[in-house]
Image (cartoon, rainbow, N blue to C red):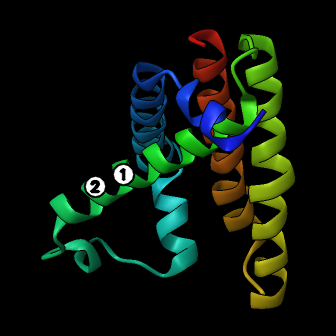
Amino acid sequence: MDMGTAFESLNWFAIIGAAAAAFFAGAIWYGPLFGQAWMADFGFQESDFEGRNTAKVFGLTFVLNVVMAINLGMFLGPEADMVFGIAAGFFTGFGFFAALLGVYYLFENRPLRLFLINGGFGVINFTLMGAILGAFK
């Protein structure tokens, strides 16, 4: 399959849905589930987030989620189903995102807990996106 065919085969409703699902999963992951631990491991205080342009942060986060969903959708191709999407999303999150993050964190001497929080979300993020993209091909 060529790149044009891969791009044309994208389901844009699924792309936006996958991006939105990842966005809301991140709000839960970095909010009530692991927000305090994440902030502690980075040394953040609540006051560090005051005065930030939240529209910019959240807007660009959503745009980047769309970019990730497009990229994953092109790798999945038009024949993917939900099961393949879940597997491909998981292995993308684990084998690319978390593995690369692990290399960075080893050299940066970051805590294991922080790797598990951020790497774990990458796995969840891509698995969720893969499920949605595969289900709605």
- Amino acid type, callout 1: Val
Q: Is residue 102 left or right of residue 18?
A: right
| Residue nearer the viewer, 75 or 131 | 75
Helix, strand or loop at disc 1?
A: helix
**Whole-percent x, y for residue 46 in the image:** 28, 71
Label 2 with label 1: CB-CB less than 8 Å: no
Q: Where, by quadrant of the figure, is residue 83 drawn?
A: top right
54 up-or-down from 74: above or below: below
**Residue at left 78%, top 87%?**
109
Q: Which mark is residue 132?
A: none
80 up-or-down from 124: above or below: above
Q: Is residue 56 left or right of residue 16?
A: left
Task: Count neighbours of disc 2 (C-alpha within 10 A) and say few if under 14, some if 14 to 19, many if 20 or more.
Answer: few
Q: Where, by quadrant of the figure, is residue 49 drawn?
A: bottom left
30 up-or-down from 18: above or below: below
| Residue nearer the viewer, 13 or 127 | 13
**Whole-percent x, y for residue 132 in the image:** 58, 19
**Whole-percent x, y for residue 38 in the image:** 53, 64
| Residue nearer the viewer, 106 or 47 | 106
Residue extending farthest bottom = 108
Q: Which mark is residue 58?
A: 2
Identify the residue under disc 1: 63
Say if residue 117 shows up in the picture.
yes
Q: Is residue 108 left or right of residue 24?
A: right
Q: CA distance from mark 2 to mark 1?
A: 9 Å
